[in-house]
Image: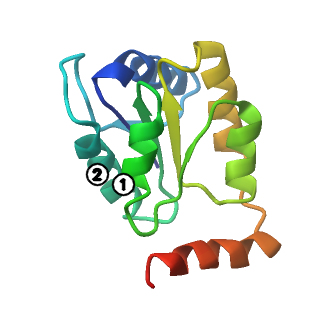
Amino acid sequence: MYFIASDHAGFGLKTFILEWFKSRNLEINDLGVKSCERVDYPDFAKILCQRVLESDANKGILVCGSGIGMSMSANRFEGIRAALCTSAYMAKMTRAHNDANVLCLGARVSGEGEVESMLEAFIQTPFEGGRHTCRIKKLDSVSKE
């Protein structure tokens, strides 16, 4: 299951992403915001991360102006591996090597064409496992030290 949330700066791009999912008959749950009214991005990152953590199969997409605030907020949650991406290559590699479960995007950074490419790469790329698994375990252990 995919979830998406944004702040006010990411609302327009989030709307585009929702339509992109709909046009491909892919299911995605919109967790807000519902307008361009100013909000605090950590509140929406928290809502999304809680939902993503309900199942290993869940993935999330967070959108703010730069993507930085959402990625910093999301990575505060144990079990969340959020990646701020600005290219399809980054989106592909963060899934393949880092098993990212949250894609963070900057509405003021990436255009719709770039975002489409990143979404396809993120959705279609599986985690490779193997040598990357021990690295993920090391990342997870840092939060427990």
Residue 117 horizontal/vertical position (percent): 70, 26
User: Left or right: 120 with respect to 70?
Assistant: right
Q: Which residue has dot 1 on it? A: 49
Q: Quadrant of residue 40?
A: top left
Local packing at callout 1 (Cα closer than 10 Å; few below 14, some 14-19, many 20+) is many
Q: What residue occupies the far right of the structure in this picture?
A: 131
55 to 121, vertically: above or below: below
Q: What residue occupies the far front of the structure in this picture?
A: 145
Q: Is residue 45 visible?
A: yes
Q: Residue at x 44, y 24 (%)?
A: 18
Figure colour scheme: rainbow
Label pair 1/2, CB-CB below 8 angstroms: yes
Residue 23 horizontal/vertical position (percent): 55, 20
What amino acid is found at the position of numbered circle 1 in the picture?
A: Cys
Residue 54 horizontal/vertical position (percent): 37, 64
The label shown at residue 143 is none
Q: Residue at x 65, y 42 (%)?
A: 122
Q: Which residue has dot 2 on it? A: 46
Local packing at callout 2 (Cα closer than 10 Å; few below 14, some 14-19, many 20+) is some
User: Left or right: 103 with respect to 92?
Assistant: left
Residue 76 horizontal/vertical position (percent): 38, 60
Q: Residue at x 50, y 65 (%)?
A: 56
122 to 118, vertically: above or below: below
SS at mark 2 in the image: helix
Q: Nearer the viewer, residue 112 or 66?
A: 66
SS at mark 1 in the image: helix
* Alpha carbon distance from label 1 to label 2: 5 Å
Q: Is residue 3 visible?
A: no
What amino acid is found at the position of numbered circle 2 in the picture?
A: Lys
Which quarter of the rendered picture does the C terminus lie within? bottom left
Q: Residue at x 64, y 30 (%)?
A: 86
